[in-house]
Amino acid sequence: MEHRDRVVMITGAGGRLGSPCALAFAREGARLILTDLDASRLEAVARAARAVGARVAAIPADVRLDADVERVVAEGTAALGPIDVLVTFAGYVPTTYVVDMPTEEWDRVFDVNVKGTMLCCRTVARQMIAREAGGAIVTISSGAGTSARAGAAHYCGSKAAVNMLTQVLAIELGPYNIRVNAVAPGLVLDQVVRRGEGSPHPYVRDMLAAIPLGRTGTADEIAAAVLFLASPRASYVHGEVFYVSGGAHCGRAHMAVARGNIQTA
Ligand SMILES: NC(=O)c1ccc[n+]([C@@H]2O[C@H](COP(=O)([O-])OP(=O)(O)OC[C@H]3O[C@@H](n4cnc5c(N)ncnc54)[C@H](O)[C@@H]3O)[C@@H](O)[C@H]2O)c1
């Protein structure tokens, strides 16, 4: 119970990854400030967390808006106490080639994924600095932050920006004993899909070919990494982009090095 009575704020808490992570913190005894744009998904995870005994403040908000983020921190803190841990799952993941890109879609990806993450980190870090008790921030990046793929210029670019934001914040907040790390998940679907089994979507099939462990991940595996990075066990881990990807970030797992003289092939 290494998170017992710690106050943990989670954005995107109603989502596929955010919701199991909130429940994992709840089982560890944390008090939860949960927020999401989608009020009904938020209420569902809040109910589930209360059912395992957690104290929860569930506050719907849009992370793109300064006033919303300030309100979540103010109301959440008033209800549960000052924040020890921030986790930023809120994200937007559309797929469009650049030549077809509506400007609004580009802006929304950067507004949610980058500006929203920055606003939450900024507001919570101000409180942590004033309190002089340190803290931990875990941003949520993606393998896409370092691996280009068609249809995701905005998404890949936004996650590359999250990686850099995380490292800049590590430098800026380290002197206050506020540790800042990113978790970069690989592909996590609602169910685990294994290479060679069933007939997955072509994108999933291609991804599986490049995942050394040969399967997609689970939301609980992402949550385990977040809980570790937020815990005292990670007390000297700082400014890290922590891949939880089955090894997909390692390189071209789907092809061996060429044998023989490729110049004459
Ligand atoms: N699932 C994956 O395979 C995967 C892989 C790599 C990275 N990620 C990242 O993990 C995070 C969560 O992904 P997910 O799979 O749970 O997606 P999801 O869509 O299930 O969850 C995202 C949540 O963010 C919320 N949200 C969106 N815009 C918001 C806003 N403006 N303000 C507040 N909340 C907002 C949504 O309502 C949703 O509940 C994202 O940042 C995503 O980029 C996911």
Image: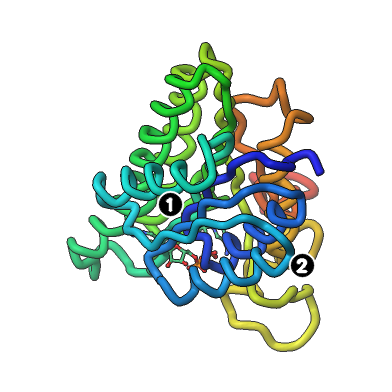
Ligand 1 lies under 8 Å from the Cβ of mark 1: no
The structure residue drawn at horizontal position 19% and vertical position 63%, both measured from the top left corner, is 104
Name the amino acid type tagged 2.
Answer: Arg
| Rendered view: 118 above or below 207 | above
Q: Nearer the viewer, residue 172 or 84?
A: 84
Q: How far across and down, in percent of the image, does residue 172 sit? A: 44, 18
Figure quadrant of the N terminus: top right
Figure quadrant of the C terminus: bottom right
Q: How far across and down, in percent of the image, does residue 85 sit? A: 58, 38
**55 left or right of 78?**
right
SS under mark 1: helix
Q: Which residue has dot 2 on it?
A: 215
Res. 255 visible in picture = no
- Alpha-carbon span between mark 2 and mark 1: 22 Å
Q: How far across and down, in percent of the image, does residue 166 sit? A: 48, 32
The structure residue drawn at horizontal position 75% and vertical position 55%, both measured from the top left corner, is 246
The structure residue drawn at horizontal position 40% and vertical position 56%, both measured from the top left corner, is 155
Q: Earlier in the sequence, mark 2 or mark 1?
A: 1
Which image quadrant for residue 90?
bottom left
Q: How far across and down, in percent of the image, does residue 257 sit? A: 75, 48
Q: Which residue has dot 1 on it?
A: 156
